[in-house]
Image (spheres, helix red, strand yellow):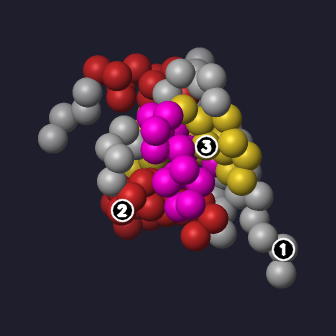
Amino acid sequence: MSESKSHKLHKRKAAGKSGKTEVKLPGGRRLDAATRNRATEIERSGNFDRILQAAKRLKASRKNQHVLKVPHNNMAKARKALRQLGISGTVKNMGETSVSHISRKKR
C-alpha cells in the first residue's frame, strides 16, 4: 500500500536537509527517516502491533536518538511500546505540540 501524503510530508520533515528517508536496515527493513544521530519512525495507524514494529525498527537502527511520531490519541500506546522493548527515546504527536521522553529502566 502506498504512503499517504501526510506520511510522506512528516518523513521529509523528520529527515531535514542533511538526513535521508527510507534508510536500509538489516533484514530488508527500512527506517522512515534518519540523520547522523537520530532515527525517526512515523506510525499513523492506531494498531499497537504496528507501533511495536516501528519501535523495533528504531532499536535496529543503532542511532543515539530515537523518535517515534504517532497521532496524539496513540501516544500512550507508543510510550508503552518503547517501555516494553526497553528503548529510550522520544514520542511526539504529529503536530509536535506534545512530547514525551522515555528512558530505559536501569537494572
Q: Residues within 10 Å of mark 1 (few under 14, many from 20)?
A: few
Residue 68 lies left or right of residue 1; in this view the side is right
| Residue kind at label 1, given as amino acid type | Lys
Which residue is located at x 73 percent, y 46 percent? 101
In the rendered image, the vertical position of residue 105 relative to residue 30, given as above or below:
below
The residue carrying pointer 3 sits among few (fewer than 14), some (14 to 19) or many (20 or more) residues within 10 Å by Cα, namely: many
Could you tell me which residue is drawn at 78 percent across and 70 percent down? 105
What secondary structure predominates along the stretch shown in magenta? helix
- Determine whether the residue tagged by mark 3 lies in a helix, strand or loop: strand
Q: Is residue 12 above or below residue 106?
A: above
Residues in magenta?
Answer: 66-81
Which sits earlier in the primary sequence, circle 1 or circle 2? 2
Q: Which type of secondary structure does the marked residue at label 2 adopt?
A: helix
The residue carrying mark 2 is 49
- Expressed as whole percent of the image width and height from the top left, the position of residue 37 reads 70, 42
Residue 8 lies, in percent from the top left, at 36, 25
The kind of residue tagged 2 is Asp
Magenta stretch encompasses residue 54: no
Q: Position of residue 69 (x, y in %)?
A: 52, 38
Q: CA distance from mark 1 to mark 2?
A: 25 Å
Quadrant including the N terminus: top left
Per the image, the residue denoted by label 1 is 106
In which quarter of the view is residue 49 placed? bottom left
Left or right, 88 with respect to 41, comes to right
- Is 32 placed left or right of 16 in the picture? left
Of the two numbered discs 3 and 1 on the same chain, state the one appearing first in sequence. Answer: 3
Who's the residue at 19% across and 35% down the image? Answer: 2
Q: Secondary structure at mark 1?
A: loop
Residue 91 numbered tag: 3
Kindly identify the residue that appears in the image at 84 percent across and 74 percent down. 106
